[in-house]
Amino acid sequence: HTGMTMKADQLRRLLTQAGLCGIYHLPSSEIDALCAAAESLDYRCFKVSFRESDDIGDALVECGRSLGFPEWYGANLDALSDCLTDLSWNEASGYIIIISQADALHARGEPFRQINQVLSNAIHEWQKQNIPFWIFYDIRSDGLATLPTLA
């Protein structure tokens, strides 16, 4: 039983707590409810698919495409960091990124860790401004024991 099965008002209240933001596992069945709650809070809810590629370059290209990054985005970790910490081109009260089909990259280890380090740094930058910035992975939970499920 995950906390994501909670009522919509509880979910909205939880999503506003920037201090709890992090990188979490999210079951596929909860994505629609999460996005609906996010949109009711004037948050942007992005869905990114790594398309089961184990190549970090492919994942970075998909991030740029799915998040609508500016033309200058260079599909590297530094550019990912720059774009995630300056979303002036897509302002919102908060942000949620749902990443799917990441099992192959997760299995590679280091590239998955590198992307998550950039995501984690972005979360902390937004927390300084008290703006919620959540990351959820929709991948098999048995392959994601290193990330908690939002409770």
Image: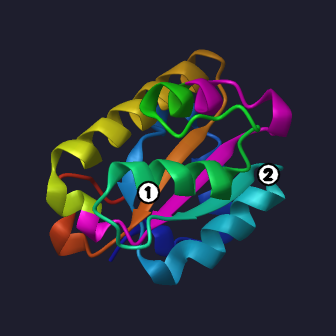
Callout 1 amino acid: Asp
Q: Which residues are magenta?
A: 82-104
Residue furthest bottom in the image:
29
Q: Residue 107 versus residue 54: which sits nearer the camera?
A: 54
Q: Percent position (x, y) of residue 90?
A: 82, 39
> Residue 33 appears in which quarter of the rendering?
bottom right
How is the structure coloured here? rainbow
Instruction: Compute the Cα span from label 1 to label 2.
Output: 31 Å
Does 146 sit left or right of 92 as displayed?
Answer: left
Residue 47 in the magenta stretch? The answer is: no
Q: Are marks 1 and 2 in contact (CB under 8 Å)?
A: no
Whether 30 is drawn above or below 113: the answer is: below
Quarter of the rendering containing residue 87:
top right
Residue behind mark 1: 58
Q: Residue at x 15, y 50 (%)?
A: 109
* Residue 127 percent across, percent down from the top left: 56, 23
